[in-house]
Image (cartoon, rainbow, N blue to C red):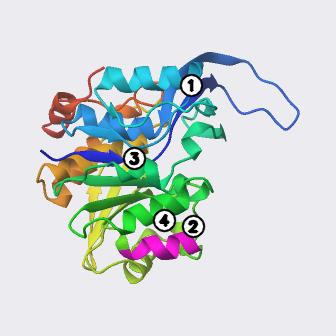
Amino acid sequence: MPRMLHTGQVIVDLVMSVERLPNSGGDVLAQSASFEAGGGFNVMAAAQRNGLPVLYLGRHGNGRFGELAREAMRAEGIQVTLEASRTEDTGLCVALTEATAERSFISYIGAEGQLSAEDLAGVAVQADDSVYVSGYSLLHAGKAEALLDWLLALPRAIRLAFDPGPLVDSPDSAAMRRLLPRIDVWTSNSVEALRFTGTSTIAEALQRLHEGLSQEVLLVVRDGPQGCWVSQHGHSAHVPGFKVQAVDSNGAGDAHAGVFVAALAQGLEPLQAARRANAAAALAVTRWGPATAPGTAEVDALVNGNGVHG
């Protein structure tokens, strides 16, 4: 049975809802605040809820945040492959959501920023697995080299999905130059794609990505409420989004990515997978919190025209 092997980072989000961000040196009152598992957890929960078993290959901490992260993964049925760190806790992200549904993050990396070749040596990869890679992982000195070595040694038939995230903004780093030829699926939002390629339109970004990646790469670039663009072999198609009332965009891109990879793993064609991913992201933005991806039944209902529920 296909699985997702997630190599990114699970952290804990301190999620706060504010009318607006304060000016530097200022203060505002939050309407709500809670601790939630976040980071890579959001993608894994989306895939798991949509029928794709998930293994978390990353590290996790030995304190209150590590326990919160592990409990969240256990509740979703995500398999944790490594023991807890002996010395560090799981990291923390302050996630601020404004009234416009826009969100901002401040992150502190903990145990999840470390990963060794020995940690990865015992991973038994199956022929139909999908390996998910976050651009954040390439920024951690205690993780990037071992992870890249492991990724590049995988059999070529293993699907590798890459999400650059907001901090990987160029193909010019040594890590990106190593990884680019191995990427099978690129998934990002439009801002990330434009920044990474130095272009001003999604069409230009898709063309530039095709020039820099393998000939077979499948590109998915999200365009907010408009849906997403899917491109392969130089042919691009727009997949429309679903009209909803957004309250919180935190985790919507992760919901999209997790459901897209799950749908591909289950044999759907890219445009079908993108439509399901668009539905998942649309449902996610109608809910507060980071890991708000819907399950298969809710995605089915929206894709089949039965409206938004919940």
Residue 132 percent coordinates (x, y): 36, 52
Q: CA distance from mark 2 to mark 4?
A: 6 Å
Q: Is residue 177 magenta?
A: yes
Q: Is residue 220 magenta?
A: no
Secondary element type, mark 1: loop
Image quadrant in which you'd find residue 97: top right
Residue at the location (34% across, 58% down)?
Answer: 161
Q: Earlier in the sequence, mark 3 or mark 4?
A: 4
Task: Tell me if residue 153 comes above or below residue 144 in the rendering.
Answer: below
**Sequence order check, earlier mark of 3 and 2:** 2
Question: Which corner quadrant holds the C terminus?
Answer: top left
| Lower position in the chain sequence, tag 1 or tag 2 | 1
- Given this view, does label 1 or label 2 mark the residue nearer the observer? 1
Q: Can you identify the residue that label 3 sits on?
A: 225
Q: Amino acid at mark 1?
A: Asn
Residue 94 or residue 177, whichever sits in front: 177
Q: Which residues are magenta?
A: 174-181
Residue 159 image offset from top left, x and y in percent: 26, 61
Q: Residues within 10 Å of mark 4 (few under 14, many from 20)?
A: many
Q: Amino acid at mark 2?
A: Arg
Locate residue 78, reporting x and y percent.
31, 31
Q: Decide: is 308 above or below 211.
A: above
How much space separates mark 4 and mark 1, taking CA atoms? Answer: 36 Å
> Residues under labels 1 and 2: Cα distance?
36 Å
Please tell me whether mark 3 or mark 1 is closer to you in this view. Answer: 1
Q: Which residue is mark 4?
A: 193
Question: Marks 1 and 2: CB-CB under 8 Å?
Answer: no
Query: What's the mark number on residue 62?
Result: 1
Q: Which residue is mark 2?
A: 195
